[in-house]
Amino acid sequence: MVNLQQRRLILILCLMLACAALLSLLTGSTSLPLYAALQQSFSDVDGVYGIILTELRIPRTLVAMVAGASLGLSGAVMQSLLRNPLASPGLVGSASGAALGAVTALYFGLSASFSLALPLGGIGGALLATLTAYLLAGREAGPLTLILAGVAVNAFALAMVSLLLNLAPSPYAVQEIALWMLGSLANISRNELWVMLPGTLIGWLLVWRRGHDLDLLTLGEETAGSMGVALEKLRWRLFIAIGLIVGSAISVTGSIGFIGLMIPHILRPLVGHQPSRLLIPSALGGALLLLLADIGVRTIPLDTEIKVGVITSLLGAPFFLWLILKQRRSGS
Amino acid sequence: MSHLIGRGLGFKREGRSILQQIDLHIEAGEMLGLIGPNGAGKSSLLRLLAGVSAADTGTLTLAGKPVSQLTPKSRAQQIAYLPQLTEIAWPMSVERLVSLGRLPHLEDWQQATPEDEAAIEKVIHQTDLTAFRNRPYNTLSGGEQARVQLARALVTEADILLADEPVSALDPAHQLDVMALLQAYVQAGHGVIIVLHDLALAAHYCNRLQLLHQGRTLAEGQAEQVLTDHHLEAAYGIAINPPAAQSGHGFALPWRRIEADEKES
């Protein structure tokens, strides 16, 4: 019965995601007659509708889905690994590390001469930051030490980003960095999709089949260890996975927060609080949320486009507050 | 059936010696009680046996094979560990928590088989958790939570069960229930090593006792050989009240469960 419940949730999320994807293809400054656009994309290489569909809308939709899925999945993994419902993928430094890597690439103008510099900088930064947090915490660290190490790495990475902003050579560079940090899916092309896919897929594969281990961590790290979980190996593996997944997503989209915190939290009661059963729904839910936020961005009638990262933060901040209040109520 | 045998086990933490030269063995169909004052090293010893921490000296073998050569999964199938009441991270239902005890028998991708379902069903019934099976763990009382964790350890059906103070949070009646469950587990051909603070329970239910003091074995054997005035004074600084000792019932349990047919009469 429980399994049926999970399958039904996955099916509903898939349907919602399909609807949102279709809506995303149709939404934008140019209204798109989908049938004509599809026809053009197969037969007429120079048709405007076909180009808009294949070069802009499809990549943007796919990147939103992949990045959202990555953030939702890594949030579920992080919360289960640290046994903490307030954990997020950014907590161990992946997001701020990605930001530092990408901003460094922007600052030194590497991205202008080498198009892959920004995403590679982001992925490298995220990996470096998560591994630093892991090594700082030490081999036998408890979740609290890991979180503290993450906070230290985050603080350092964000300070370095501020320093780079401070020292930026021109107002143009400052603007470029600042806008990137807001997080956006505008101007996404197929190239970005190809850039994010390898790291994302490797990261997803590393998480693959670790569900039982995450389930056993529910019982505490010591008990999980006695039940066959090689905790140190598991942590290495998942930290690397999260570095790759979050780095790949953020280096393409810019900083997008709160999806990894909100989605697993909302879905957890629907899967009976079991970590292994939370993974796929969280990925689907993350994809859905980012896609909807991006559709929202495109439909808000403002002269200046609101960045999608701003929308997720606007949703996320009050959600965090609600979580804290809930925690306080249950604690008292 | 497996024998778990430890020889010359030693363990240090931050340069301080926690356990020294501990010899220990357990066989199928036997309950060994680990007793000793707070800080004697009982829980550390259990963690060593469970594979949670590694011994600095000595050897540990299971059915003649060094435990260190077993894969973590194979070790977990044969040795189950029930630590002192631990915090559960998520408010999962009782049934799901108990079912986690079957994971050492499953591959990473595998769902529970009918055999697993049957084992879970049996243990939920034995531990009297049927009425709670769908309740979230965090809504249970301390005693009920202790029973859920015991059920989680029993359902693995490991040859050896290591239980760290499984009755310390329970009232006298539930203490007897848990001890009876463990006794039944032993009679079904398993071995149990249990850490107890209650010497009367230890004397009554365990086949053998091992008294630890300052990280070493002070005495080992039948209850009457271990629980002597000399040993108790050395380990705990206590003496048995003379009237109780003289009557020969120093460690007799002064209570028992009232059976259903007794209540009716």
Image: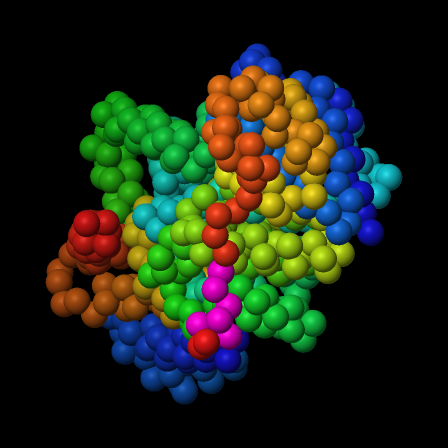
Residue B184 colored in magenta in the image: no
Query: What residue lies at 26% left-to-right and 28% top-to-bottom?
Result: A162
Figure label count? 0
Q: Position of residue B210 (x, y in %)?
A: 66, 31
Q: Is residue B262 magenta?
A: yes
Residue drawn at the location 24% of the way across and 70% of the way down: A29
Residue A115 in view (yes/no): no
Magenta part of the chain: B257-263
Residue B216's x, y, as percent? 64, 20
Colouring mode (rainbow / by chain / secondary structure / one colour): rainbow
Q: Quadrant of residue A302?
A: bottom left
- Work out whether residue B103 or residue B143 is closer to the camera in this orientation and state it: B143
Q: Position of residue B132 (x, y in %)?
A: 42, 69
Measuring from the top left, give residue B201's x and y in whole percent. Answer: 55, 44
Q: In front here: A266 or B144?
A: B144
Foreground pick, B252 / B67: B252
Does residue B94 appear left or right of residue B64 in this picture?
left
Residue B87 sits above or below residue B16 on the image: below
Residue at the image point whose x is 60% and y is 15% from the top: B17
Residue projecting furthest to the left? A302
Q: Is residue B114 visible?
A: yes
Question: Where A220 sits versus A16, above or below?
Answer: above
In the image, farthest residue toward the right? B64
Frontmost residue, B89 versus B118 = B118
Which residue sits furthest bottom?
A35
Q: From what the image shows, is residue B153 above or below residue A175?
A: below
Which residue is depicted at the point 42% across and 59% down? B144
